[in-house]
Amino acid sequence: MEQNFEISEESRNDIPVVSVSGEIDVATAPGLRERLQALVASGKSTIVVDLLNVSFLDSTALGVLVGVLKRCREAGGDLRLVMTEPRIQKVFEITGLTDVFTMFSTVDEAAQG
Amino acid sequence: MQQLSDVVELSIPVRADLVVLARLTAATIASRAGFGVEEIEDLRLAVDELCLSLVGGDSSGRLMLEYIRDNDVIEISCTYDPGAEGGGADRVSPKHDDLSVRILEALVDQHGRDVASERPRAWLRKRRVHTAV
């Protein structure tokens, strides 16, 4: 059964942590983009995106993350990703994005940088 | 010889929330064909990219998908009918972005694009390697 798409947000060490669960695809990626862009617009240049509970992710999701990464870096910060699921890591590997993003296996590590 | 039951057709309106149906159908057919878990996940993502590569962010028209299983091979073709607003075959290339190409290259054995009945079509072919336990 499909897991519902949900986004939640908290703060660790004054760094916003956006946790996503479910499938990030063409239907749900716009919601994630809106949430992340609002954070950048509010002055947060470093953001942690927790993908630990994401079960599916496609090129639309990657496009959103790359776009927000660019905005974060332009503002002097970074977009840090948290993931451990091999299926999700594989999508980043085959698209060559493992060299582009800073990746962590826990939210705590990502928040510490 | 291919049997009638090995061909499944799915026609869906181009709506972001319905692309999941293309994925679910691919996963179900691959599972019944004995594909391994990882192969099923590969096919699920690949068919998603196949649909995206044709329609991008459009929200009109219909996608016609045909799933064919032939022994250890599943072939999926996706044809885009843009409907009354048109667009037609000249739209084949612009939607096919680099990330989708890389994903398809990595996940399936063959994929391609052409024009069928003046409508853009994308297809993929994946052979079963691992048998489900």
Image: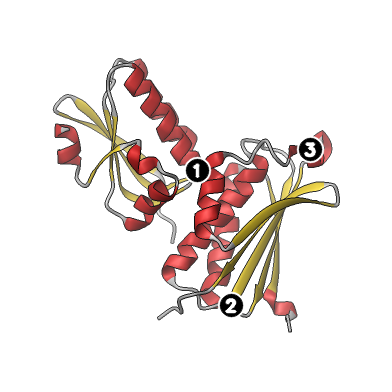
Task: Say if A16 sits above or below B12 in the image.
Answer: above
The quarter in which the C terminus of chain A is drawn is top left
Q: Secondary structure at mark 3?
A: helix
Q: CA distance from mark 1 to mark 2?
A: 27 Å
Give left or right: position of A50 versus B105: left
The residue carrying mark 2 is B72
Q: Quadrant of residue B47?
A: bottom right
Q: Quadrant of residue B23?
A: bottom right
Mark 1 crowdedness (10 Å alpha carbons): few <14, some 14-19, many ≥20: many
Point out the residue furthest to the right here. B117
Point out the residue furthest to the bottom here. B1
Across and down, in percent, residue B112 comes to: 67, 54
**Which residue is at a point 20% across and 27% down the rendered structure image?**
A15
**Which residue is at a point 48% across and 60% down the rendered structure image?**
B42
Across and down, in percent, residue B9 comes to: 71, 64
The residue carrying mark 3 is B90
